[in-house]
Image (cartoon, rainbow, N blue to C red):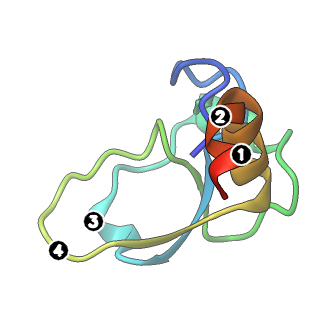
Amino acid sequence: MGSACGGVCACSTCHVYVRTGASLLSEMEDDENDILDKAFDVRASSRLGCQARIERPGEIEIEITRESYDAYYNEHPDERAKR
Ligand code: FES
């Protein structure tokens, strides 16, 4: 995932879609919701990867958004070159 702000809930580069196991995660707080408003293609399953904490055991499947992939490769251009 991207992490432009370093995980302090100040960007949306860690935007993911939770495919399964959303009930195992922490509830979304207001500041996460506010930042998600700035993300692209927000869906009902959207979360910020840096804010969603795993609180219960079980299987969780997420999809990393295009926004987050792009941010990651912009932050790590050497990794992009390896693709
Ligand atoms: Fe910036 Fe998650 S890394 S909000």
Which of the marked residues, 1 or 3, is nearer the chain's N terminus?
A: 3
Mark 1 or 3, closer to the camera? 1
User: Which residue extends farthest left?
Assistant: 57
Q: Residues within 10 Å of mark 1 (few under 14, many from 20)?
A: few
Q: Where is residue 48 in the image (x, y as percent from the top left)?
A: 57, 45
Query: According to the image, label 2 marks what residue?
Result: 78
Task: Work out whether 69 lies above or below 24.
Answer: above
Residue lying at 63% horizontally and 18% vertically, measured from the top left: 5
Task: Work out whether 81 lies above or below 66.
Answer: above
Front-lying residue, 23 or 73: 73
Ligand 1: which quarter? Answer: top right
Q: Which amino acid does label 4 sit on?
A: Gly
Element under disc 4: loop
Front-lying residue, 79 or 33: 79
Which of the marked residues, 4 or 2, is nearer the chain's N terminus?
A: 4
**Which mark identifies residue 24?**
3
Circles 1 and 2: CB atoms closer than 8 Å = yes
Element under disc 3: helix
Query: According to the image, label 1 marks what residue?
Result: 81
